[in-house]
Amino acid sequence: MKDDRGELDLTKRIEDLTSELKSVKELEESHRELNGKLQQELADCKRDNVILAHDNATLSNRLRDAGK
């Protein structure tokens, strides 16, 4: 069905803006979910980095002690 309302019709403008707002809210929710996943992945990487640094230090100490 053809919409014969012009660009200056306020009800049409409200409908357009409402539709756009809905799309933006959906996008925002998607970004929130992705951000949460990325924050968790970052926390995991930081935890793993601490573990690896500790393991590296332990192995370095063993090599140093073995060389004495």
Image: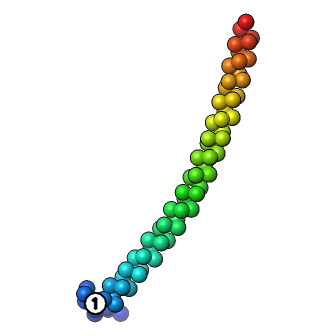
Circle 1 packing at 10 Å, graded few (<14), some (14-19), many (20+), is few
Residue lying at 54% horizontally and 57% vertically, measured from the top left:
35
What number of labels is visible? 1
Residue 16 image point, x, y percent: 36, 82
In the foreground, 1 or 34: 34
Q: Residue 25 at what x, y percent from top left?
A: 48, 72
Specify the color scheme.
Answer: rainbow
Q: Secondary structure at mark 1?
A: loop
Quadrant location of the N terminus in the rendered image? bottom left
Residue 58 lies, in percent from the top left, at 72, 23
Q: Quadrant of the C terminus?
A: top right
Say if 35 sits above or below 7 in the image: above
Is 17 left or right of 38, judged from the image as shown?
Answer: left
| 6 left or right of 60 in image | left
User: Which residue lies at the image location 58% right of the left edge and 52% below the top edge?
Assistant: 39
Q: Residue furthest top?
A: 68
Residue 42: x and y, percent? Answer: 59, 46
User: What is the quadrant of residue 5 in the picture?
Assistant: bottom left
Task: Find disc 1 in the rendering and name its residue.
Answer: 9
Q: Residue at x 67, y 26 (%)?
A: 56
- Residue drawn 46% across and 77% down? 22
Amino acid, disc 1: Asp
